Image: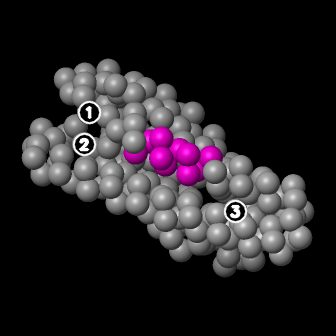
Amino acid sequence: MSWPNRITMLRLLLVPVFILLVLSAADAAMYRYAAFALAVVIGACDAADGIIARRTGSVTKIGSILDPLADKALMISALVTLSLPGILSADQPDLRLPYWVSVTLVSRDLFVLVGAGVVFLLVGMFHTMPSGIGKAATVMQFILIAAMLASPDLLRAFPKATWTGLHVLWGLTVALGILSWLGYVRTGSKLLTAGGH
């Protein structure tokens, strides 16, 4: 168990804590602040384990499996919980992630996981098919989660600008998600074709 893999395991263990904090966010603002801080920590750990693995040459097969699982576990759980009515603030019950955003992005993440599994079963290797646009989509989802957690306070201070910013962020995140989705389909098709399937 290398240090990058230990960090990845920590990220997985922190996901249930993050979910519980988000589910309690409407009860007290401190839970939302804690969820925001934890999301930042998980994002930093995500960057750190990749950098350490590359610099120390400790990229492992189990790490290549656990890393995307940790990413998707956080993303899917965050997108689902942030879509629940009244989840972020008791006095702002309409503030939530729109279903068209969460359904699109969750579908994309599930597709990546299932697609990687299919490639593994048919080609004999686990391949998450990372790409520049895919990494950008993941970073944008982290930004989206952080923005949603900060949005109750931003709306009180700058209501019009915040709503405009949220709509732009939702659109950009979904657009990147769809583009990366198409990229995964193309790359996966090439891998299956090369493998004779």
Residue visible at 24% across and 42% down in the picture: 151
In this rendered view, identify the residue nearer to me: 26 or 182.
Answer: 182
Give whichever of discs 1 and 3 has the lower sequence position: 1
Q: Which element type, helix, strand or loop, lies under badge 3?
A: loop
- For residue 128, the mark is 3
Residue 156 in the figure: left or right of residue 53:
left
* Residue 7 on the magenta span: no
Q: Label 2 is placed on what type of residue?
A: Ser
Q: Main secondary structure of the magenta part?
A: helix
Pick the quarter of the image with the N terminus.
bottom right
Q: Secondary structure at mark 1?
A: loop
Residue beneath label 1, please?
A: 95
Task: Name which of mark 1 and mark 2 comes first in the sequence.
Answer: 1
Q: Which residue is mark 2?
A: 151
One can see residue 127 in this view = yes
Q: Quadrant of residue 27?
A: top left
Cα–Cα gap, marks 1 and 3: 33 Å
Residue 60 is left or right of residue 160, and the answer is right
Q: Is residue 56 left or right of residue 183?
A: right
Which sits in the foreground, 191 or 74? 191
Q: Considering the numbered disc 2 on the image, is that residue within a helix, a strand or a loop? A: helix
Point out the frontmost of discs 3 and 2. Answer: 3
Q: What residue range appears in magenta?
A: 101-110
List x then y, in percent, for residue 59: 75, 70
